[in-house]
Image (cartoon, rainbow, N blue to C red):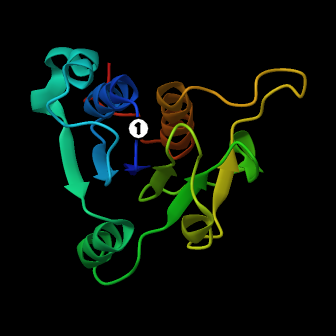
Amino acid sequence: MKIVLFEPEIPPNTGNIARLCASAGIHLNLIEPLGFKLEDRYLKRAGLDYWPHVRMDVWPDWDSWLAAATAENGGTPPRCVLTSARGGEPLQHFAFAPDDCLVFGPETRGLPPEILKRSPYRVRIPMRKDSVRSINLSTAAGIVLFTAMSSCGLMEGPEWR
């Protein structure tokens, strides 16, 4: 499983997601343009001292990431599970697979239509109708990642505490 952040904008969110990835042994992929520099102090602070444990790559655009992910997957494009506050299957009903790439859009606008057209697999985090319109990106990434990993049995074994 992998996390892909498409054009992330807020450094503390990306730092928190990097820390999440380090804790779960998940590869983090950032697709440019980024709304910050990787040297940003807020990004580094959110990731604390976990940066040596983060497997992270930065890609100039979606197509570059997809080409590399396809090559790594033996020539088959990876299954991209796109997240959206505006549509998709409720998270708890989606059949995740161990090799899924969980894709999250920028904080202020979500995934653009040209990316949403790339995959039929979409999930959303259910929220009460009379509540907020969305959940913070780093919180959403944690909810989606651990739901996906748990449903696939990926948090079992001696390496987990």
Residue 115 occupies which quadrant of the picture? Answer: bottom right
Q: Is residue 32 left or right of residue 107?
A: left
Residue at image x 20%, y 27%? 40
Residue 31 occupies which quadrant of the picture? Answer: bottom left
Q: Is residue 29 left or right of residue 6?
A: left
| 148 over 161 or under it: above or below | below
Q: Dot 1, crowdedness within 10 Å: few (<14), some or many (≥20)?
A: some
Q: Which quarter of the rendered picture does the C terminus lie within? A: top left
Q: Which residue is mark 1?
A: 9
Q: How many marks?
A: 1
Residue at image x 49%, y 67%? 79
Q: Tell which residue pokes out farthest to the bottom in this image.
A: 75
Which amino acid type is shown beneath numbered disc 1? Glu
Mark 1 residue element? loop
| 88 over 19 or under it: above or below | below
Q: Is residue 119 left or right of residue 50?
A: right
Q: Nearer the viewer, residue 72 or 51?
A: 51
Q: Is residue 38 left or right of residue 160?
A: left
Q: Tell which residue pokes out farthest to the right in this image.
A: 130
Q: Nearer the viewer, residue 138 or 148?
A: 138
Residue at image x 25%, y 78%? 71
Q: Position of residue 135 (x, y in %)?
A: 63, 27
Residue 65 occupies which quadrant of the picture? Answer: bottom left
Q: Position of residue 60 (x, y in %)?
A: 25, 63
Q: Position of residue 22 (x, y in %)?
A: 25, 31
Q: Position of residue 78 (x, y in %)?
A: 42, 70
